[in-house]
Image (cartoon, rainbow, N blue to C red):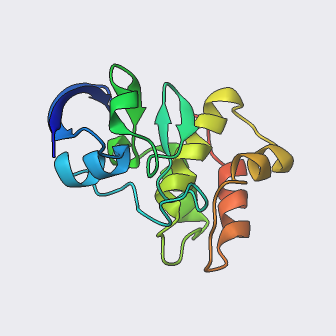
Amino acid sequence: MTEVDLHLRINGNPVNVRAPEDAMLLEVLRERLHLPGTRFGCGQEKCGACMVLIDGKPEFSCARAASTATDRDIETVDGLPKDDPLLVSLLKHQAAQCAFCLPGIIMSAKALLKRSSRPDRSEVLSALEPHLCRCGAHQRIVKAIMSVEAS
């Protein structure tokens, strides 16, 4: 299998990494760069567990070739500070059970909060449309996103 050099910007840092030419971005993030926050869920862009921000927009990383993300700004949940207002709100509202879906949801919510500091319920629901939460925390997640204190 042919490997290629990838020049990525991950969480504000330039990163050079060798990976198989057909490697998915998710695989590079988790296995080559040891950023475990982004999750593999379905591999078919149907659950949202793999969501990252690319140039500020939510993008699935499970079925996206890593080579298409070269020289782009990639943000992952691993890059968020522990005192990020969204994380604080999610904890305050106990908005997670298994937390498997949460990294992807957090990244979509971050993109939404950059566009609208006080999103209404319909905006939050629209932003979370690509995400599947099976443990029933969805309503608390929505409430937490709507309650984020601007920093």
Q: Residue at x 53, y 77 (%)?
A: 97
Give the mark count. 0
Quick check: can you spot residue 81? no
Q: Is residue 40 left or right of residue 14?
A: right
Q: Quadrant of residue 57?
A: top right
Q: Is residue 132 above or below residue 147?
A: below
Single out the residue that lies furthest toward the front.
1
Instruction: Identify which residue, 81 or 92, lies in the foreground.
Output: 81
Write down the quadrant of residue 136 in the picture.
bottom right
Relative to 120, is 12 on the left or the right? left
- Residue 63, image x and y in percent? 46, 49
Q: Tell me where residue 10 appears, x and y as whole percent.
A: 30, 32
Q: Position of residue 128 (x, y in %)?
A: 69, 53
- Please, is residue 137 above or below residue 83 in the view? below
In-image side of 66 versus 104 (left or right): left
Residue at 33% across / 31% down in the picture?
67
State the image coordinates of residue 151 (x, y, percent, origin top left).
54, 33
Visible in this render: residue 108? yes
Left or right? Give the position of 39 relative to 87: left
Looking at the picture, tell me which residue is in the foreground, 3 or 148: 3
Q: Residue at x 33, y 19 (%)?
A: 71
Q: Nearer the viewer, residue 103 or 4?
A: 4
Q: At 19% across and 45% down in the image, what residue appears?
A: 33
